[in-house]
Image (cartoon, rainbow, N blue to C red):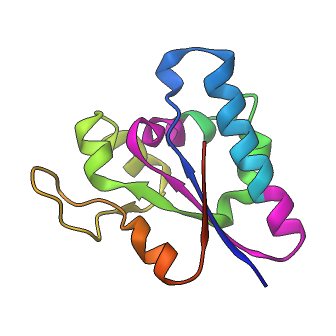
Amino acid sequence: MSKTAIVIYSDPKANSEEALGRVFNAMFLAYELKDKEQEVALIFQGTGVRWVSELTNPAHPANALYNAISDKVAGACLGCADVFGATEDVKSTGVSLVGDKAIPGTSGVIDLSRYLDEGYRLVTF
């Protein structure tokens, strides 16, 4: 069985259809893989950490899809949340802030190489 890690980098602050399309398609892929009972991890990295508070808002158009795959969310990058001012917003959602790789100048980031080491494919949006 294949394993896929889906990394969301798009920024909701772009206020563009493209940014919304990217996060929607990332979640749709997670939904498809979950439906096929494949192993999938959804990761919020870079400015993508800002999506967490957006998607957990019941008024957001992608909230229902997010809720359908929220059990596949592996976490949001701690260092990225710090840099992009999203730490408190992510904490308020209950999504894990992950800083398992020490990088100078940050409080730690998600170690994407770990997913590669574990045989995951990486797909980025």
Q: Please provide the residue range marked out in magenta.
A: 31-53
**Residue 91 at x, y percent in the picture:** 38, 51
Extreme right residue here? 36
Frontmost residue, 36 versus 81: 36
**Residue 40 at x, y percent in the picture:** 68, 69
Residue positioned 43% across, 48% down in the render: 45
Frontmost residue, 75 versus 88: 75
Seen in the picture, residue 47 relative to 43 is either above or below; the reply is: above
Assign the C terminus to one quadrant of the image.
Answer: top right
Residue positioned 72% across, 48% down in the render: 27
**Residue 35 at x, y percent in the picture:** 89, 67
Residue positioned 74% across, 35% down in the render: 62
How many numbered discs? 0
Assign the N terminus to one quadrant of the image.
Answer: bottom right
Residue positioned 42% across, 65% down in the render: 112
User: Do we see residue 59 in this rendering?
Assistant: no
Look at the image and say whether residue 44 sits in the magenta stretch: yes
Position of 5 compared to 93: left or right?
Answer: right
State the image quarter where residue 99 is shown.
Answer: bottom left
Look at the image and say whether residue 38 sits in the magenta stretch: yes
State the image quarter where residue 83 is shown.
Answer: top left
User: Do we see residue 49 in this rendering?
Assistant: yes
**Residue 17 at x, y percent in the picture:** 69, 17
